Image (tube, rainbow, N blue to C red):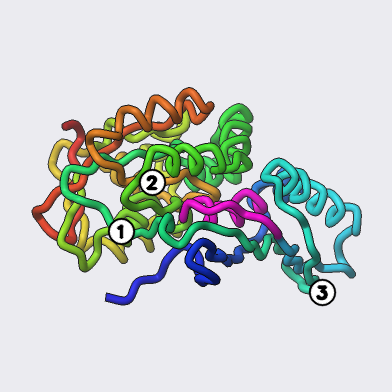
């Protein structure tokens, strides 16, 4: 089965491959500097998800020059540059167009050893699933627009979305994993489905073990649901089975579209706790084991409240 991966990989030699990816989107926060940080972190994430090291980046800019002050663009670019410096990535250029809708992101090139590339496929029965960031950015962002989420909740998700997946990726490569992807617009279950669809394995997710941002559960129960969540659920409903002990708001959170979310790592049972400990020591403090890979049912995800 041909698969779409998080980034493109091209083998140059027996010892070296390049990873290429790009991503850009419209603002999801009001502060242009923070938006630049989030967009850059999100663009770099696909390289980290494959276990690689990003090296260079180019800015992708769509900006309404006639209707918006150029100082806003300056702040966005400065935010992006700060994240690139944090990632030890060199900005080598970019391209901008006059557009009525503001957008920003990066085209990123990284490197990896060809034998160390981590793909979405590769999970083995018995593997444990580790998620490195909490869920809820879509739900909280929707609530912020409606005036229902606190400033503290908005600040927490902004900090998470602007946090690089670098440390998580480095720990993952140090310990060794079988598969990985990053959690973005398709939500946790949508991206998990990509890892097992058409394979000989399935997954069991324990909803109560999944880390979520404070206020997410209450806001989901209130109906603060982004439109993308419904699309994610409709698209993957044939592959996901919820057990009766899973509450409706929990199911919604698992389909919540994320921006610059964490990594979902499939790692052997023997290495799982060691990897989790290393992640916590590296500062990826909200990482958690949220489920396991099973040999039956194949190509399906079962969601239970607890193990």
Residue depicted at x 63% and y 51%: 28
Q: How many marks?
A: 3
**Quadrant in which the N terminus appears:** bottom left
- The residue to which callout 3 is attached is 98
Residue 304 in view: yes
Residue 197 location (% of width, % of height): 24, 64
- The residue to which callout 2 is attached is 264
Residue depicted at x 51% and y 61%: 15
Residue depicted at x 62% and y 35%: 159
Determine which quarter of the picture holds residue 228. bottom left
Determine which quarter of the picture holds residue 206. top left
Sort mark 3 into few (<14), some (14-19) or many (20+) by Cα contacts within 10 Å.
few
Q: Nearer the viewer, mark 1 or mark 3?
A: 1
The Cα–Cα distance between marks 2 and 1, rounded to whole angstroms, is: 10 Å
Q: Secondary structure at mark 2?
A: strand
Q: Secondary structure at mark 1?
A: helix
Q: In the image, 70: left or right of 220?
A: right
Q: Is residue 44 magenta?
A: yes
Residue 124 location (% of width, % of height): 21, 51
Q: Which residues are magenta?
A: 39-56
Q: Main secondary structure of the magenta part?
A: helix
> Which mark sits nearer the N-terminus, 1 or 3?
3
* Closer-to-camera residue (13/67): 13
- The residue to which callout 1 is attached is 195
Q: Are marks 1 and 3 in contact (CB under 8 Å)?
A: no
Sort mark 2 into few (<14), some (14-19) or many (20+) by Cα contacts within 10 Å.
many
Residue depicted at x 68% and y 61%: 106
Residue 227 location (% of width, % of height): 45, 58
């Amino acid at each position: 089965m041909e698969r779409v991966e998080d980034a493109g990989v091209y083998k140059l030699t027996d010892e070296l491959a390049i990873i290429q990816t790009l991503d850009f989107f419209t603002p999801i926060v009001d502060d242009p500097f923070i938006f630049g940080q989030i967009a850059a972190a999100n663009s770099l994430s696909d390289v980290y998800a494959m276990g690689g090291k990003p090296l260079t980046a180019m800015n992708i800019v769509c900006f309404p020059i006639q209707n918006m002050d150029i100082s806003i663009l300056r702040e966005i670019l400065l935010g992006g540059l700060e994240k690139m410096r944090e990632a030890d990535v060199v900005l080598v250029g970019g391209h901008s167009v006059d557009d009525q809708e503001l957008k920003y992101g990066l085209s990123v090139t990284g490197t990896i050893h060809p034998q160390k590339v981590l793909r979405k496929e590769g999970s083995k029965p018995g593997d444990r699933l580790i998620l490195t960031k909490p869920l809820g950015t879509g739900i909280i962002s929707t609530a912020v627009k409606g005036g229902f989420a606190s400033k503290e909740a908005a600040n927490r998700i902004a900090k998470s979305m602007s946090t690089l997946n670098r440390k998580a990726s480095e720990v993952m490569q140090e310990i060794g994993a079988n598969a990985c992807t990053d959690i973005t617009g398709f939500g946790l279950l949508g991206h998990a489905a990509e890892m097992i669809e058409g394979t000989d394995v399935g997954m069991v997710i324990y909803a109560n073990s999944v880390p979520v941002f404070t206020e997410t559960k209450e806001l989901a129960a209130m109906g603060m649901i982004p439109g993308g969540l419904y699309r994610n659920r409709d698209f993957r409903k044939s592959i996901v089975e919820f057990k009766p002990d899973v509450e409706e708001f929990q199911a919604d959170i698992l389909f919540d579209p994320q921006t610059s979310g964490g990594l979902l790592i499939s790692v052997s049972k023997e290495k799982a706790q060691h990897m989790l400990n290393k992640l916590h020591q590296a500062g990826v403090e909200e990482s958690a084991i949220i489920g396991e890979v099973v040999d039956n049912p194949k190509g399906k995800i079962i969601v239970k409240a607890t193990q």
